[in-house]
Amino acid sequence: MPLALDPEATFDFWLESDKDKPAERRPTFIFKHLSLRQTRAAAGPIDAVSTTADTGGTIAALCDGVRAGLVGWRGMTGRDGNDIPYDPARLDEIITAREAWELWFGAATGRSPNEADLKNSESPSHSSSANSAKGAGQAGTAAEDTSQNDA
């Protein structure tokens, strides 16, 4: 099933400035995967930047673009230390313009820029390497490869 059609398919996104915080304390935004059409509709901020000098309108379009995929957040606390319950209407009260752009690109691409950090972690792969391609000089015959797959 395409991710944009799966109502359960979401992804976590945290800001670059929060990447080193422990997971249980890291403010995390939760996004649904957008279809291409939804991404195109949420592209208003890009169009607004190139066609208007109205900074307020650009920021409003940017927040709307982020809200298009935003379905929740967790670990969000105010300066007073109190939890901020999820309310997409409050988005522009809790993030900066730079963070809004970071969130918009994350929502539009359906991935966190932090994935590279996670993939390069020292955690072992969860997949088996049994059927991985053989290295140079280790290639077996087609019959050997077929028999391994049949086993």
Image (cartoon, rainbow, N blue to C red):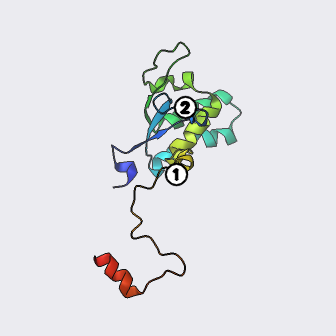
Residue 126 sits in quarter: bottom left
Q: Position of residue 139 (x, y in %)?
A: 48, 82
Q: On the rendered structure, is 76 left or right of 48? A: left
The circle drawn on residue 119 is 1
Is residue 40 shown to the viewer in this render?
Answer: no
The residue beneath circle 2 is: 21
- Callout 2, which amino acid? Lys
Q: What residue sits 46% from the left and 53% below the top?
A: 124
- Callout 1, which amino acid? Lys
Mark 2, other Cα within 10 Å: few <14 / some 14–19 / many ≥20: few
The relative height of residue 56 versus residue 3 in the rendered view (above or below) is above
First in sequence: mark 1 or mark 2?
A: 2
The relative height of residue 69 versus residue 121 in the rendered view (above or below) is above
Residue 150 sits in quarter: bottom left
Q: Position of residue 24 (x, y in %)?
A: 45, 30
Measure the alpha-carbon separation of dots 1 and 2: 18 Å
Q: On the rendered structure, is 45 left or right of 82? A: right
Residue farthest to the top, as pictured: 80
